Image (cartoon, rainbow, N blue to C red):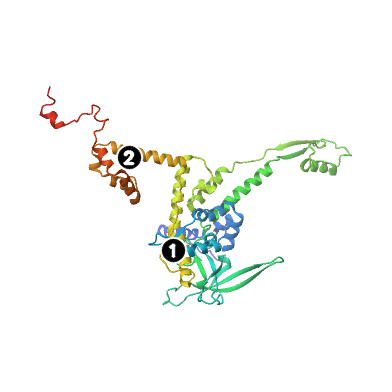
Amino acid sequence: MTKKADTVTFNKKDFLRTMNGIVGRSDLLQRAGKSYTDDRDIYKALGFESSLTFKHYWEQYKRGDIAKRVVEAPVTESWRLPPMIIENDSNETTEFEDQWDVLNREKKVLNYLLRADKLSGIGRYSGLLLGLDDGRSLDQPVGTATQLLYLRPYKEENAVIKTFVSDITDERFGLPELYEIQTTAVSTDSNSTKTRLVHWSRIIHIAEGLLEDDVYGTPRLEAIFNQLKNLELVSCGSAEMFWRGALPGFAFILDKDAVLDSSLTEATMATDLEKYFHNLQRSVNLQGMDIKSLAPQVADPSNHIDIYVSLISGATGIPKRILIGSERGELASSQDETAWNKRLEERRINFISPNIIDPFIQRLQKFGILKEASYSIEWKPIAVPSEKEKAEIVKTLSEAIATYFNALDAFDFLPFEIYMREFLDFDAELIKKVLDETKGATRTKLNEPSSKNNPTGKDNNPKQDAAGGDDE
């Protein structure tokens, strides 16, 4: 006797509850690149890596054109004009400033800081090793040092964090305690790699884009990695498309009633075809065949490439024109450049100065290599106006001042000193210089009758006119 299959019934309420559960789980899984209850792995279907490591970022940086630009553009542009280290409350060159200048010149400090900054963006962090003459091994805290011997920047892969400070009462709780550095000795025969433990006091830890902790930053390629792969597929696929489409395919159709010459064998026809396709022979000897050209399907990939470049630009904050070096559109170019320069200025102030330069200088001051002193980090403006822009600024400034001087009672309503400070954005030194040079000429000028408003040169007195006018 056949057993009757069980029947599952749903009422409307049960059905809606079940569907809501399916949709909810689907949304959750989609966030991890999966949908349809694990039946569809979007990342796997599209060829994306589900888990990214440093090797993925490093390979993309080394071989990827746009990827390299994304990593290097913020760094090279931020450091393009080097900072000046100035001791506070001193108008003359101090011992601290002399020490810094000598150290930077002999050890190329700023160049090493730039390189470490660049490496920190490829992975989650980078480490700058300080070679000191304290006489201790690298795995020991720094003792008394008098000289900085060398600097060595290391990427994340070659500066692995081995242990963290676990004492919750320590001010460095949760920060690295020991690093494992891979050093490479280069020789004429081969390169040998050594692994050394290094104490944290000998390493300047650099990480950008920190979130939950102060150790692991955000790789610059992480958010755009999938789009970089898409861009590679489109650009490389289009190259293959044009390569294959440059020579159209051919269809060789044999006439069913044709009688082949015994001297024209399959081997001889194959030889002729090979000479046609691979050599300079432009004719083939065929019999009883009709040859038809197959039109290649070649499409313009520029629109697809533009989409991915736009997505990468939006995710990284690098304007598309600057990302690819295009100069089209003067208005858009100036707006992009202004926004980009502002972002670089913010990066200097909020990241480079407090997270790279300050820790380096303060570490050397602590060791006694640099003199203890209060200092400031001063950056030159990134946006330097061209000669044409300078001329336009001078013209606009001159017109503004002329308008102010030609306005009646302007000095009484808005003193010239306030006008220069609030509207012309003059600093205190420049305002003092202007006032000293004019020596009250501005007030005298404003009290003189304006020939424009009074062409006759007479004193127009409305009270006198009301009293009876001129005596005639």
Q: Which residue is mark 2?
A: 401
Residue 297 point in image, percent of width and height: 64, 41
Q: Which part of the image, by quadrant, shows the C terminus?
A: top left
Q: CA distance from mark 2 to mark 1?
A: 41 Å
Specify whether 295 is left or right of 401.
right
Of tags 2 and 1, the one toward the viewer is 1
Which element type, helix, strand or loop, lies under badge 2? helix
Q: Position of residue 437 (x, y in %)?
A: 32, 45
Q: Residue at x 53, y 66 (%)?
A: 127
The circle drawn on residue 50 is none
Under circle 1, the secondary element is loop
Task: Report if the CB atoms under discs 2 and 1 are less than 8 Å apart.
Answer: no
Q: Quadrant of the N terminus?
A: bottom right
Residue 395, horizontal then vertical, whole percent: 39, 38
In the foreground, 240 or 316:
316
Residue closest to the far left: 467
